[in-house]
Amino acid sequence: MGKRVVIALGGNAILRPNQEATYENQLKNVQISSDLIANVKKAGHKVIVTHGNGPQVGNILRQNEEAKAVVPALPIDVCSAESQGFIGYMMEQTLKNALQLSGETAGVVTLVTETEVDPADSAFQNPTKPIGVFFTEEESKQLVAEKNWTMGEDAGRGYRRLVPSPKPIKIHGVEAIKTLIEQNQIVICAGGGGIPVIRNQQNLLEGVEAVIDKDRSALTLSEQTDADVFMILTDVPNVYLNYGKPDQLKLEEVALADAERYMSEGHFADGSMGPKMEAAIAFAAGGKEAIICSLDEAVAALAGHAGTRIVPNK
Ligand code: ADP
Ligand code: MG
């Protein structure tokens, strides 16, 4: 029996570090990911795909900043929606082609997805996520005064806008997603964490200038779609203890309690493996399996033959 699988793709699946962000480069990378995701579908599973958007939304914000004298700059939530459309289009087309070439009848749909956050989330009082272009100290002061932006120095490279990274509480369109996967469709959704929205004082939806962590939103998506398996595909084949040290140790099947202990021992770096393990642990705590593996080992990992699998306690 096929499983209901949520696949979360890392940034590398779209653009590798040091690669120029041309359409051709991104399409080529996405094609490779799509061929591998098509294999998961061919193995008989129901597939929901979500993805990061860091470099892409960064570039859209830059285009807005550079061209603002000619065309008004758009808010971050709108740029996030643009990036979902752009990346979703590339994924949908390459996935359809991959399925067609292997004689599969499954379809593919992309949903521009809103992710609801709590307006009272403490992240709004403490913006931490650097985004978009770099400014000089002078420009940065001006932006604080003019636009009330929060600015911060980013690793000696200049000043950047800092935005809140609130927790996702609800992925919109979950019922539609569940219906579509039962209709033999691969669904691409909640890209870049989803477009951050809140409910305002009238209880109506409204976009907010924030960024939602992709690993966290992928967890929420997995929980709210009742996924059997939550897979995080990244650029390493496994999670390791003592990562990068001579005594590094590959993790294969890990019981939830052990994963929690390794987490508290500090084996997983903040901002990279940390949020992935946190999400995987939370999913496994719900009684189902979470997998962290490389893109090309997705099918083998689902069969229990590759990757790091966090499983509920026996
Ligand atoms: P993505 O774009 O897929 O979100 P990240 O760069 O955020 O990728 O996270 C993956 C990276 O996490 C790996 O390339 C690796 O360098 C790093 N990493 C940190 N700690 C670990 C660990 N304990 N085991 C494996 N990888 C780790
Ligand atoms: Mg990451």
Image (tube, helix red, strand yellow):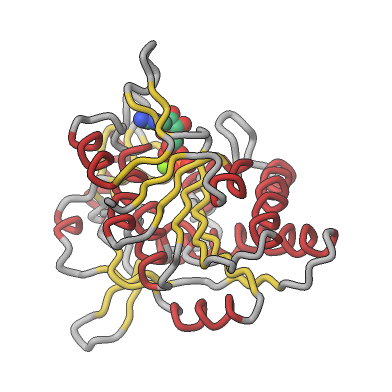
- Residue 108 appears in which quarter of the rendering? bottom right
| Residue 132 placement (x, y as % from top left) | 42, 45
Instruction: Give whichever of 115, 184 is nearer the camera.
Output: 184
Q: Residue at x 26, y 54 (%)?
A: 164
Q: Residue at x 40, y 37 (%)?
A: 134
Q: Residue at x 28, y 74 (%)?
A: 198
Up/down of 165 relative to 237, above or below? below
95 left or right, relative to 294: right
- Residue 88 appears in which quarter of the rendering? bottom right
Up/down of 166 relative to 1, above or below? above
Quarter of image, ligand 2: top left
220 left or right, relative to 199: right
| Residue 128 placement (x, y as % from top left) | 24, 45
Q: Count the marks: how many?
A: 0
Up/down of 252 relative to 195, above or below? above
Furthest-bottom residue in view? 202
| Residue 303 placement (x, y as % from top left) | 56, 50
Furthest-front residue in view? 314
Does the image show residue 133?
A: no
| Residue 218 placement (x, y as % from top left) | 41, 59
Does the image show residue 246?
A: yes
Instruction: Give whichever of 282, 200 is nearer the camera.
Output: 282
Instruction: Assign the N terminus to one quadrant of the image.
Output: bottom right
275 left or right, relative to 51: left
Q: Residue at x 38, y 23 (%)?
A: 249
Instruction: Give whichever of 175, 91 is nearer the camera.
Output: 175
